Image (tube, coloured by chain):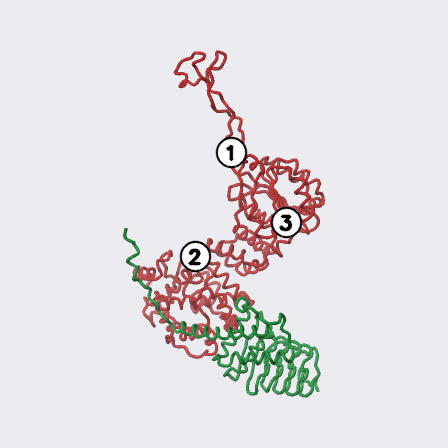
Amino acid sequence: MKHIPKSTWLKIRRKHFFPPLPFPKVAPKDQKAAQKDPKIEEGQGKAVLEIRNKQITIDSGFLSQISERMPEGDAIEALLDHAIAHYAFCPWDFANYLRLYAEAKRVCKDKDIAKKATDHFMDVVVDTYCVKEKESTIPSLYKHMEKGKIDQVICALYQKIWGKDLNVSGFDELVKKLMRIPYMNKKRWAEGIKRFTHALRPLLEEEMFNPASNPLGDHKSMFSKESIDKGLMELAQSASSPKEFSELVNDFKEELEETGYLDQGIGRGKGQESIANILYYMKLAQNYTLSLKKLPEKKSGSIYPHSHSPWEIEKPYYDIDIWTSFGKILPGLTQVWNRKEGEILYLEEKVPNCLIIIDSSGSMTDPRRNLSYAVLGAACACEAYLKCGSEIAIYNFSDAEVGGKCILPFTKDRMAIYQSLCKYFGGGTYLKPSDIQVFEDNDNDMDIFFITDMKISNFSEVVNYFNNIKNRVTAVHIGESVHSQRFALSVSKKTNISLYHVQKKEDIPKIVLGQVKEYLHQMF
Amino acid sequence: MKNPFSEFKDFRPKKREIPLDKIIASKEKVMQSLIKAYDKLVEQEAKELVWLVSYHSVIRAYASAEKTIKNMEYGVEDIEEFLFEIEDSSKLPYPIMGLSGLYVSALCNRAKEREIVLDLQNRNIALHLLGYRLPKGKKLIVYGDLGDFTGIGLNGGEIWVEGNTGNWTGAGMRMGKMVIKKSVGRRTGEDMVGGEIHVEGKILGVGNVRYGRIYEKGGIVSP
């Protein structure tokens, strides 16, 4: 059989409540995979199911082999049940997969073993789900499939927990431990995978020396870019530090590159750590939404008809309102329009570009080691401006006088922006107002987002500079210090500068970008 | 207007039961009783803010632990799972490691199985006082490191530790055998009155041994 009958697919879709998946394929094994895994080339490889970006592909060679031992239709049904359940139940999405993987890695400390443990655990969960919740032919498939050592253990487990004979014996001690795990309880998967990995670890380690691919395929390539995006966002939020996030992302570097999630070359050499770091702040920032005030209405200089007044001889004719003058030109009867300068929307309320000034001196947190509120705050600001189609320029400084600075001209290139944001110089703090002047010359109306702990050696010069500019400035100081109080006092009368204080992560969403105190004065 | 969902009013999804459901239910029951008994022990012992290891407090706590688990049915897998529960601090309000160790010792001493294997490798627990009064005929094999007071008052049983143990290992042991594959801390064998301690790694310090023997890397160090 070279294809799956439509009736079979319809039956399985109905069984799984019509998942939005494309029609599955039956095809020979992936040549690329065969090149990577010599066993597959020799025809001994065991991966019979491939799930790549929602497309399920069943190996035609396996189908013809298994059809000698069981009805081919049953085998197809079992394989499709298994594959669909991965989308419908476990892991469901990349975020869940990462969560399970992180727990497994905590137990075994090795990324390859953790990946294998996660795959096996998810297989047990979905197979049990199919057997319990759906009428599935999965037991028959396992009964007739060739099994490696771990497959035998898992089949022995299935015998106990499904109550079906799968032609396997032994492994009683191990199965006793495995059969106590609540596979069907989603809330307890995290503790379940820990116990699962703990019990299977010796066998998994053994398997590393004698690699055998998972018969029902691995699950790393099954996620779409959107799912990966969401997963990384959740991981960034749950990770205790950038290091933890980086470690996990680096574990999946190959898979992420394979799906095209990471641009080629980004993860090379020394940059490896920074790409994970950039991703951490990028994904974390995407969890926050900062309010962004658009530029205010501005007098444009154009005038529009406002009210009427009687026409006099010396007044021009072109202002005559012929409707209210009843078509007559007579002084006293004829009326002319009085025109008034109007307040119209400036540039259709476009959000201006933004210059991010970020302090990365020694007194600031190193974004590679710990969560830097400065980088996160600046990243959130960037996201808010980028969403509105504006461009971002970066001025990342420590001791700018001796070259401790990174300047990025106005751009929409997110990766370049984050690379400049995440740079950390350490050392002293000196801000050169003349550097900022260059940006101002390019874009007069730009907003400025300034984030620092205010411990700047040329503090008076900086305060002076901010007191003399008319751009909207959102100044954020990290932590409380004498310097920040001095800054607040110095700019307290400036209506174009809004000052925010960030002491913890939760303070960041409170920042309103481009807020000008003047609006409030106008309103009340 | 007719409720469009009224047709589904009598629809009940088919509930299939598989043996796993029963296994999990019975296991949960046992685990709940083990946790309840542990909570009771903690409640009794943690009246003072700090639980200190002293001769009287250990005897008292162990007696309470034995009393709380008196009529309970459990197996080695339940003990191992209880250790996972201890690790998850959100489940147990007071994971006091000394008390936990005594409680697990009581569970091991009362277990039906003669050989008990506990795998503590790569786990976030440091159990103290494990192996307390392990009786003759019982063998406790532990993979991973243990805390202080391992095997105190050993009563003829055998303890094999595939890892390190802390200070006061085998203190007050009466008879039996302890084998520690890696190193032990200070005051090893303090007040022991019989039995043997074999350390394949390094002994940081030997205590005042009354009777019994202590070996380090095959060579006798006490008496």
Question: Label 1 crowding class (10 Å Cα cut-off): few <14, some 14-19, many 20+?
Answer: few
In front: mark 2 or mark 3? 3
Q: Between residues A376 and B101, which one lies in front from this camera angle?
A: B101
Whichever of labels 1 and 2 marks the residue nearer the N terminus, that label is: 2
Disc nearest the viewer among 3 and 1: 3
Question: In the image, residue A135 lies at what x, y percent?
Answer: 34, 67
Chain A appears what colour?
red
Q: Chain of mark 3?
A: A
| Residue plotted at (29% across, 54% down) | B4
Q: Secondary structure at mark 2?
A: loop
The subunit letter for the residue under badge 2 reads A
The colour of chain B is green
- Indicate the amino acid at tag 2: Asn
Circle 2: is it few (<14), some (14-19), or many (20+) Cα within 10 Å?
Answer: some
Identify the residue under disc 3. A478
Which sits earlier in the primary sequence, circle 3 or circle 1? 1
Is residue B81 in sight in this rendering?
no
Would residue A497 appear left or right of A94 to someone viewing this image?
right
